[in-house]
């Protein structure tokens, strides 16, 4: 078994490619499962050898792609700590937060578990968990929308320039209102451990979804 | 509250003891501590995540209110038939892009949609999942239309579109007419038809075979109380007929 640093073989880029591809699938699936958008805009596709739902709405797809394209450099440099898909009610208070916590080991041990096929197996398990998560979550109020938050390891403002990859897709520091959730219920969904990346997915769910949070 | 004081039998000091006890029972003076604000960065800024400034698009199903047009019955499609097309009908409402679609469904073939003008913005269209033609196989066409078809060398199976503008709908709202047309197509009342609401142009385009076009035109006019001239347009030729 050989041990390499992250700079060797440009592993950062490989991990960013894999994770961004996964996050795209995951975001589409979350939006479908949690009924943020009408089910009619979704089509069944196959990814990681399992059926997934993907939006066929160009504007939504573009939005997700743009978001992830901006997140990619942060993942590549191991500066993204968490990527959170926040589902918000009409008043823009979070009702659910799908938290993807990412950890990339500084030293990489090359083994059979590093193979892409093995990583994809692990990602498949996460996807399957998302597809059935509605069983453990309460229904969301109507008229929900979503946003993607990125928690960085360093100061958010220091990373602001790094995410401004697309000219017409600016990033801002999130409002506290969109971040804080009153008395959230924690629902662990899945963890995965591979040589190149570790990830855990959990959901923070607002206790009273039908009521507006009053801080 | 009663307070009992137990003391050793020393009568001289009784007054002192009572005085001391009263003082002990007095409330301690207290003050509200100011909120601690460190002079160094608190870490709040670090913990605040970043997010895209632009909100995601909002997609609504505009026929949810009518029970007749439930998602099980209607299908929506991209008018161009391609999901990747950047052209999209959108209306900006209070900083957020609002896109309305008739309802859910599957993808549609491109054949019915080839007459969509490339310059116009794409919108959603409706067609019946169980497209049935009427038992009447022969629809008579007027001599005038027959001459027009001959003049342009058009086949009866070629597609054409009726253009319904806002003026045709008055005093109704064009949205109301669109709902009725969607319903009619869904229930196979308009043979060979599929329809397309060009919100950018404020027009409804009803596509049909030329063999049915006069029947469709009259049906539209009579059943949806349309007024004024309805224009029949054919791809590459433009307006060829008026009703």
Image (cartoon, grey):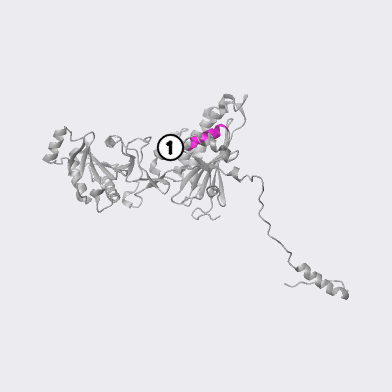
Give how far across and how far down residue A40 sits, in percent.
38, 43
Residue A22 is at least partly visible in this image: no
Question: Which residue is label 1 attached to?
Answer: A62
Instruction: Please identify the dominant SS of the magenta region.
Output: helix
Is residue A66 inside the magenta stretch? no
Chain at numbered mark 1: A
Specify the quadrant of the image occupied by residue B15: bottom right
Specify the quadrant of the image occupied by residue A198: top right
Query: Is residue B37 shown left or right of residue B210?
Result: right
Give how far across and how far down residue B158 sits, in percent.
21, 35
Q: Quadrant of the C terminus of chain B?
A: top left
Local SS, label 1: helix
- Front residue of B167/A71: it is B167
Residue B89 is at least partly visible in this image: yes
Give how far across and how far down residue B205 sits, in percent.
26, 42
- The number of numbered discs placed on residues in the rendered structure image is 1
- Front residue of B74/B240: it is B240
Query: Is residue A137 shown left or right of residue B149?
Result: right
Q: Quadrant of the N terminus of chain B?
A: bottom right
Above or below, B186 relative to B15: above
At x 20% / y 41%, what residue is drawn?
B232
Residue found farthest to the front = B39
Please report the bounds of the magenta region as a residue range.
A67-77
Is residue A70 inside the magenta stretch? yes
Give how far across and how far down residue B94 sits, in percent.
42, 49
Label 1, residues with CA under 10 Å away: few <14, some 14-19, many ≥20: some
Residue found farthest to the left = B143
């Amino acid at each position: 078994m050989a041990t390499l640093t992250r700079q060797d073989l440009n592993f950062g880029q490989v991990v960013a490619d894999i994770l961004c591809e996964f996050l795209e699938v995951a975001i589409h699936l979350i939006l479908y499962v949690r009924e943020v958008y009408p089910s009619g805009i979704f089509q069944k596709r196959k990814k990681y050898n399992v059926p997934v739902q993907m939006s066929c709405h160009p504007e939504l797809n573009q939005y997700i792609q743009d978001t992830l394209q901006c997140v990619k450099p942060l993942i590549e440099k191991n500066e993204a700590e968490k990527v959170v898909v926040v589902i918000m009610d009409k008043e823009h208070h979070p009702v659910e937060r799908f938290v993807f916590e990412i950890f990339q080991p500084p030293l990489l041990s090359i083994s059979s578990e590093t193979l892409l096929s093995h990583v994809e197996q692990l990602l498949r398990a996460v996807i399957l968990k998302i597809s059935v998560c509605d069983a453990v979550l309460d229904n969301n109020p109507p008229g929900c929308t979503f946003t993607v938050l990125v928690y960085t390891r360093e100061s958010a403002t220091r990373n602001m320039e790094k995410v401004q990859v697309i000219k017409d897709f600016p990033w801002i520091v999130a409002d506290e209102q969109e971040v804080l959730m009153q008395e959230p219920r924690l629902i662990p969904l899945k963890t995965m451990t591979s040589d190149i990346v570790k990830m855990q997915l959990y959901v923070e769910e607002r206790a009273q979804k039908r009521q507006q949070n009053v801080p | 509250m009663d307070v009992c004081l137990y003391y050793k039998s020393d009568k001289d000091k009784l007054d002192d003891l009572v005085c001391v006890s009263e003082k002990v029972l007095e409330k301690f003076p207290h003050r509200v501590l100011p909120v601690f604000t460190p002079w160094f960065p608190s870490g709040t800024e670090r913990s605040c995540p970043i997010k895209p400034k632009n909100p995601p698009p909002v997609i609504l199903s505009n026929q949810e209110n009518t029970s007749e047009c439930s998602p099980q019955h209607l299908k929506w499609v991209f008018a161009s038939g391609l999901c990747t097309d950047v052209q999209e009908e959108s209306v900006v409402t209070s900083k957020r892009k609002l896109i309305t679609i008739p309802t859910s469904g599957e993808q549609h073939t491109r054949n019915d949609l080839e007459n969509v003008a490339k310059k116009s913005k794409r919108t959603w269209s409706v067609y019946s999942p169980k497209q049935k033609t009427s038992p009447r196989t022969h629809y008579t066409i007027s001599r005038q239309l027959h001459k027009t078809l001959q003049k342009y060398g058009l086949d009866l199976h070629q597609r054409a579109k009726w253009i319904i503008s806002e003026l045709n709908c008055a005093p109704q709202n064009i949205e109301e007419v669109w709902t009725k047309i969607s319903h009619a197509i869904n229930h196979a009342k308009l043979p060979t038809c599929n329809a397309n609401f060009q919100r950018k142009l404020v027009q409804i385009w009803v596509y049909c075979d030329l063999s049915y076009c006069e029947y469709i035109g009259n049906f539209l006019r009579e059943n949806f109380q349309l007024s004024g001239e309805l224009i029949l347009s054919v791809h590459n030729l433009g307006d060829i007929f008026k009703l």
